[in-house]
Amino acid sequence: MRANSSFLLTGSLLGLAVHWTSAPAQTIRIEGSSAGLTISQTAAAEFRRSHKDVAVNVGVSGSGGALGKLCRAEVDLAHSARPILKAEIEACNKADVPFIELPLAFDAITVVVNRKNSFVESLTLAELRTMWEEAARGKVVRWSQVNARFPNAPLKLLAPDWQFESSGYFASALFGPGRSARGDTMSSVDDNVLIQGVARDVNTLSYVPMATYLENRAKLRAVPIAPSAGAQAVAPSPETIASGQYRPFSRPIFLYVNARALARPEVAAFAEYYIADAARLVQGARYVPLADNVYRAGQERLRRRIAGSVWGGAAPIGLTVEELQKRSAL
């Protein structure tokens, strides 16, 4: 916000009245994936109530985009739907930007269809591969080609933009690391576009963060996923994510903090507030919270300025809450 001034001339004398709308004295910058966005937005809004001289700018640039900016010291914090990767760690080291890794929550990629869709009760991983694999480009274009029990209706796929972590994680979970999904689907950087597309067409399928689905479940229906034909299909929920049943689409969310930025009192205060109240913020944003001892370990990392990642530059697929919590304890 910029300062605004107004000038008033009165009578034959020059009277000057200046009215200032003061701008925040400090600005904190945080960016990240669409998954976790509402957690950061809530943290920022609440922090501003007691720190009116601080602006907290929250942006969406995907996990990779946000971590790249963190390593270039262009943002102070980044929330990410995966651990920081080896190349990103090397970029941070090269730029002399130490970072603190704070596990924040668990999310799940949720496959969604129109609420009026009556033929998709569940899907297997094999069926998802059939419709999303690169070999399906321009060929698998009708639902009956995925499974003969489906109608001979147009198969319409919507996907998050390739730069967003949901897109890469979804493909890695289905096909293995480094492989991508078909490139002839409609895509958008805005989850709302995906939601509206599915809500308008009974033959459309997409995938979004679970928290996004929960906010829009009046318009969408989550599709339970089975690991194989004949196996029990599991729907995403806080319970199935916490128990490890909903795999391989469950994924962690992290908060990364530029350790050098903590020299600024406003950044230190915000980071401390964020992680100290993380469980409540996470639940309020409809994500799955972690155990209290994980958040306490995060507070200790922040207090002692313990930099680095415990994941060795890898982003495991199908990680469970229990595995994350074991690795994250001090």
Image: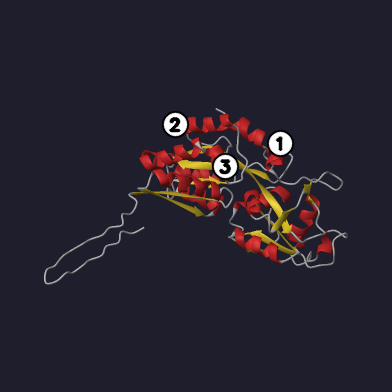
Residue identifier under label 2: 303
Label 3 near label 2: C-beta < 8 Å? Answer: no
> Measured from the top left, where is residue 273 in percent x and y?
46, 38
Q: Camera-side residue: 271 or 165? A: 271
Specify the farthest residue to the bottom. Answer: 12
Residue identifier under label 1: 243
Front of the two marks 2 and 1: 1
Is any atom of residue 78 visible in this view?
yes
**Which secondary structure, mark 3?**
helix
Residue identifier under label 3: 282
Q: CA distance from mark 2 to mark 1?
A: 31 Å
Q: Amino acid at mark 2?
A: Arg
| Disc on the earlier residue, 3 or 1 | 1
> Are there few (<14), some (14-19), or many (20+) residues within 10 Å of tag 1?
few
Q: CA distance from mark 3 to mark 1?
A: 17 Å
Q: Quadrant of residue 272?
A: top left
Is any atom of residue 183 visible in this view?
no
Specify the farthest residue to the left. Answer: 12
> Measured from the top left, where is residue 83 in percent x and y?
58, 42
| Disc on the earlier residue, 2 or 3 | 3
| Disc on the earlier residue, 2 or 1 | 1
Front of the two marks 2 and 3: 3
Q: Amino acid at mark 3?
A: Val
